[in-house]
Amino acid sequence: MRPQDVIRRKRDRGELSDDDIAFFVRGVTTGEWADYQAAALLMAIFLNGMNERERLALTEQMLKSGRTLDFSHIPKPKVDKHSTGGVGDKTSLVLAPLAAALGLCVPMISGRGLGHTGGTLDKLEAIPGYRVRLSLAEFGAVLERVGFAMIGQTEEIAPADRRLYALRDVTATVESIPLIAASIMSKKLAEGLDGLVLDVKVGSGAFMKRPREARALARALVEIGRGAAVRTVALLTYMDQPLGRAVGNALEVAEAIETLRGRGPKDLTYLCVELTAHMLVVGGIHDTLDHARQQVRACLQTGAGLQKLRQSVEAQGGDPAVVDDPGLLPQAQHVAELPSEEAGYVAALDAERVGVASMILGAGRVRVEDAIDPSVGIVLDKKVGDRVARGETLARIHYNDERRFMQARDLLRSAYGFSRTKPRRKGIIAEVIA
Ligand code: URA
C-alpha cells in the first residue's frame, strides 16, 4: 500500500479500511508519510467526511500512537469532563474538586487558551506556585492522594494528534467533525477512563457557531466513547454570552472559589451542578441525576469541594492560602468601569468579542508561544436580561496597559446590545446526548 492509494480512496469518496487508517496514523507518527501526503488526506477527509467506523478507527489509532494511562490501582471510578472551549468557562476548577469530594477519581489533562477562548492550565497557573507540568508518576500520586489532578498535554499522550493538529492548523482543515472528534477523544481515552462528560459549546463564543454542527460533533464524540466502552454523555450548552461574570485567569480562579463556597453566579453554579451530576451518574456513584444533583448541592453548602481544591493546590506546589483569600491572586494595577450609554435591558453580550477584549488586555494569546498576564480581564456586572440605567456600570476592566485598555474597552462596548423590553432568557443547556 502507498500513501497515494489511501489519499485517492478518500478523494473519490470511498471508505477507508482499518488498515488504511492504521497505515496513515503510523506513517504520520514515524515520518514515513510526507507532510504533503498527510495534508492531502486531511483535506480529503475534511471534504468527504468519515463514517462512524472510520472515526472510531482513527481515534483508536491516534490513541495507540502513544501511552494509555492506567490508574486501575485507585479503587474509584475514573471520570473526566471535557469542554470544547468558551469564554469564562471555569467549570473544570469547580467540578473536579466537587467530583473528587463525592468519590470520583478525575485525571484531568487540560489545554491552554488560544484566540478568544480561555484554557484551564492558564487559569491554574494564576495561582502562585501551581505546577501543571507534573511527570506522569507525580500526576498519579496527586490523583491517588487528592482524588483529582490537573496537568497539560504530555509528549507521551497521542503524539499523532500533535503532528496532525499542526498540519490541520496550516492547511485549513481544523473545522472537520471527524478530525476534531478523533483529536479530542484520542487524548481523553488515553486517561484510562470509565466515564466521560462532554460539554459541547454552541454559539458566538464557541468553536461551533450553529446548533446543527455542534449536535453532529456531540453525536460523533458520544459514538466514539461508546465504541471504546467508555460511558459517555454530551451536553450541548449555549456560549452566546460568557459563562459567569469573570473572564481572565486570576479573576476566573477567584470566581471558581466563590462558586465552591456556594456564592457563585447562578449560570455557572447551575452548569457545574449539572456536569458534576452527570459525572457521578456515568461513574456509577449514583443511579439518578436527581440524587446526584442533591449530593453536589450539599457539597457546595458544606465546603467539601473547597477543601478538595485547597488540597489540590497544595499538592501541585501552589499557595493554598489563595483558597481562603483570593486577594492573594495576581491583581491588575488599574480597574476601570464601563458605563452604559443606553437605558433598557441587555439583549445581547457577544461572547467572542468579550473573549477577544480579554485577550487584548493580555489574558489570552494570539499565538501558542505568547506569554499571558494572569491579573488582567473583565468582570461583567450586567449580562443578558439585566436592566440597566444610562451611566450604570456594565463591566469592570482590570488592566495594566493603557493602550490595550482603550482597544479592549471599545470592543467590549460593542459586545453589548440593548432593547427596551426584557428579552427572554434561554436556559444554558440546549440538549443532552447520551
Ligand atoms: N480541540 C482538540 O483537542 N482538537 C481539535 O481538533 C479541536 C479542538
Image (spheres, rainbow, N blue to C red):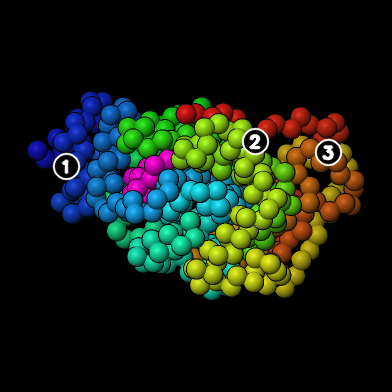
Is-magenta flag for residue 380? no
Q: Which residue is located at x 63 percent, y 58 percent?
A: 306
Residue 146, above or below 96: below
Label 3: which secondary element: strand
- The residue positioned 85% from the left and 41% from the top of the image is 387
Q: Secondary structure at mark 2?
A: loop
> Does the magenta run of residues contain 189?
yes
Q: Nearer the viewer, residue 403 or 87?
A: 87
Q: Nearer the viewer, residue 50 or 150?
A: 150
Quadrant of the rendering where the N terminus is positioned: top left
Query: Of marks 1 and 3, which one's residue comes earlier in the chain?
Result: 1
Residue sitting at x 27%, y 54%: 67
| Residues in magenta, as a range | 184-195
- Residue 370 percent coordinates (x, y): 49, 66
Q: CA distance from mark 2 to mark 3?
A: 19 Å
Among the two numbered marks 2 and 3 on one chain, the one whose residue lies closer to the N terminus: 3
The residue at which mark 1 appears reads as: 23
Judged by depth in the image, the label closer to the viewer, 1 or 2, is 2
Q: Amino acid at mark 2?
A: Ile
Return the mark for residue 428.
2
Q: Is mark 3 within 8 Å of ligand 1?
A: no
User: Callout 3: 10 Å neighbours few (<14), some, many (20+)?
Assistant: many
61 is higher (above) or lower (below) than 370: above
Q: In the rendered structure, which amino acid carries the disc numbered 3?
A: Tyr
Q: Which residue is mark 3?
A: 345
